[in-house]
Image (tube, grey):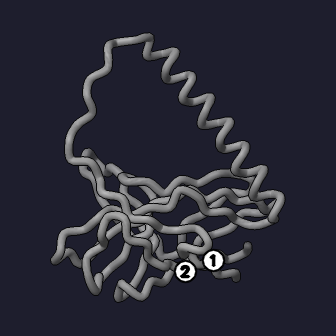
């Protein structure tokens, strides 16, 4: 197992405030072309992330962030992109954070039309040579029993533990 610490000197888990306002409507364009361009850009970005991770023969974490919480919130979530640069599957097995009583790996998904969230007791699987995105409404790191609110712009330390890399 290898531990990766997200800090200001390494990869910062910077809290960003989720926008409350909706996006302004853009004029209707060729949405098929726009979606294809976005998908192509994502595929290229994924390939670049995996290539960078393969150079280190480890999992590389990028774009880590968490939502700001209300002052009395007892839970919060973190999101990130993880590129597994190894030749074998890996697992994000756990995380620790001094600002939370405990940290769990979670998945949110729709089950019979209802959004449900459940802990992943075996961790978050990371396919070899692939990118896994932890994002709202899907896989995420859950901070439980927060000792204080998560604030926009504040950096916090989170230690991620991987099974293999």
Percent across and percent down for residue 149 are: 25, 76
State the quadrant of the N terminus: bottom right
Query: In the figure, 88 relative to 165: above or below?
Result: above
Q: Report the residue at 58% width, 68% height from top.
A: 11
Residue holding disc 2: 159
Query: In the figure, 145 relative to 65: above or below?
Result: below
At mark 1, the secondary structure is: strand
Residue holding disc 1: 4
Percent across and percent down for residue 55 are: 83, 59
**Toward the viewer: 128 or 17?**
17
* Left or right: 28 in relation to 91: left
Q: Report the residue at 44% width, 76% height from top.
A: 156
Label 2: few (<14), some or many (≥20) within 10 Å?
some
Q: Report the residue at 38% width, 64% height from top.
A: 15
Q: Earlier in the sequence, mark 1 or mark 2?
A: 1
**Toward the viewer: 141 or 51?**
51
Label 1: few (<14), some or many (≥20) within 10 Å?
some
Q: Report the residue at 63% width, 69% height from top.
A: 91
* Total numbered circles: 2
* Left or right: 87 in relation to 29: right
Mark 1 vs 2: CB contact within 8 A: yes
- Mark linked to residue 98: none
State the quadrant of the C terminus: bottom right
């Amino acid at each position: 197992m290898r531990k990766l610490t997200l800090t200001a000197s390494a990869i910062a888990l910077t809290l960003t405030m989720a926008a409350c306002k909706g996006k302004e409507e853009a004029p209707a364009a060729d949405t098929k072309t726009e979606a294809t361009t976005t998908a192509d850009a994502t595929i290229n970005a994924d390939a670049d992330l995996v290539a960078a991770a393969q150079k280190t023969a480890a999992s590389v974490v990028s774009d880590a962030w968490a939502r700001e919480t209300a002052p009395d919130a007892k839970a919060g979530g973190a999101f990130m992109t993880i590129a597994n640069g190894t030749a074998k599957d890996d697992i994000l097995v756990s995380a620790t954070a001094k600002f939370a009583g405990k940290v769990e790996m979670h998945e949110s998904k729709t089950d019979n039309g209802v959004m449900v969230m459940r802990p992943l007791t075996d961790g978050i699987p990371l396919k070899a040579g692939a990118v896994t995105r932890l994002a709202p409404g899907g896989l995420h790191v859950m901070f439980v029993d927060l000792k204080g609110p998560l604030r926009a712009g504040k950096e916090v330390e989170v230690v991620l533990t991987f099974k293999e890399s």
